[in-house]
Amino acid sequence: MIVADHVTFQYADSSDPALKDISLKIGDRDFIGITGTSGAGKSTLAMALNGVIPHEFKGDFYGSVKIDGMDTVEHQVEDFCRKVGEVFQDIDSQMVASVVEDEILFGLENFGVSHEEIGARLEKALDDLGIAELRTREISSLSGGQKQKVAIAAILALEPQILVLDEPTGELDPESSREIFGLLRKLNEEKGITIVIVEQKIKLLCEYVKRLVVLDKGSLVFDDVPGEVITHIDMFKTLGINVPPVAELSHLLRLDGLWNGGITLTVTEAEKMVREVLHDPV
Ligand SMILES: Nc1ncnc2c1ncn2[C@@H]1O[C@H](COP(=O)(O)OP(=O)(O)O)[C@@H](O)[C@H]1O
Ligand SMILES: [Mg+2]
């Protein structure tokens, strides 16, 4: 469990705080999305959730972040990094090896996992991500989606309770992006891993996450289930965040008095709505 309590952080060379008075609770088995426009503070928040901020970035830090009751300011990053695994925005700079299995082994060896255990952990991580056949491939020869899976597998091998991912689908096509979300859901549901995903793809967030947090200029503006957050469509427009077309459609039909149900988040829900509006049952 991570509890952020009134967190404000200002980078040393900046004139404005990147995070302003953020309070947030991340419980066990949560699947949380963090969204907002570029510069909203998403990456800063992601790094504050495992102690990288304030330890590896200079600045003024107020408030507290506690990971299972341990204050991140009072402990070192090493105390948390196995509990809270983080896949950073720029995976190429996070990767250290040139071959897939070495990338995963590097973390395991670095964290002193015993030799007897290493082989099993490596195979399990590859299996969990469905990339066993990539084991001996050169990382430079992989597609973006495959690389992202290797980065996740390398972190997963360390058996974190919480996985924080910063825009993992940023450079992926829609199909690979959906695949990553599907994998994260599986890790959340089947392995009980808490997932925190920073993401701009609001449509995927609405479909997959259990809770959606919206940041704007360092402040937390929403923190609720996606179906509730997305009802503030006008606010999203003001913030410059694109809402999914299916949500917008239900919003417009509501404004016209043609629909009095909720905001639809998926094409299936929207189809049902349109049939009702047109009195055209399946
Ligand atoms: N290392 C840094 N030093 C100074 N300012 C930074 C640094 N990283 C980010 N910022 C600033 O902090 C704010 C939030 O940035 P960031 O957390 O990267 O936002 P996001 O991930 O939502 O795009 C921005 O104004 C950005 O310019
Ligand atoms: Mg970012």
Image: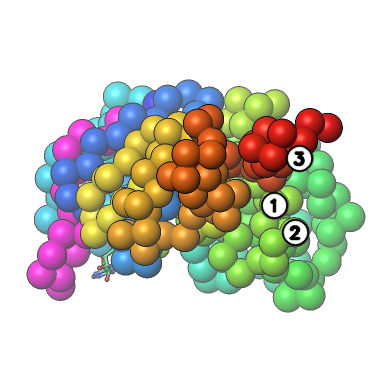
**C-alpha separation, residue under disc 1 versus residue under disc 3:** 16 Å
Q: Which residues are magenta?
A: 3-18
Q: Tag 3: residue type?
A: Asp
Asked whether the residues under the numbered discs 2 and 1 touch, taking CB atoms below 8 Å apart as contact, a structural biologist would say yes
Count of number-bearing discs: 3
Q: Tag 1: residue type?
A: Arg
- The residue that appears at 77% across and 70% down in the rendered structure is 142
- The residue that appears at 83% across and 57% down in the rendered structure is 135
Left or right of 123, for residue 23: left
The relative height of residue 139 versus residue 228 in the rendered view (above or below) is below
Disc ID at residue 128: 3
- The residue that appears at 13% across and 65% down in the rendered structure is 16
Which of marks 3 and 1 precedes in the sequence? 3
Disc ID at residue 175: 2
Q: Tag 2: residue type?
A: Glu
Q: Quadrant of ligand 1?
A: bottom left
- As rendered, which of 39 and 260 lies closer to the eye? 260
**Residue 70 sits inside the magenta stretch:** no
**C-alpha separation, residue under disc 3 versus residue under disc 2:** 19 Å
Left or right of 50, for residue 63: left
**Secondary structure under the numbered disc 2 in the rendered image:** helix
- As rendered, which of 62 and 276 lies closer to the eye? 276
Residue 137 placement (x, y as % from top left): 83, 66
The relative height of residue 36 versus residue 119 in the rendered view (above or below) is below
**Secondary structure under the numbered disc 1 in the rendered image:** helix
Q: Which residue is mark 1?
A: 178
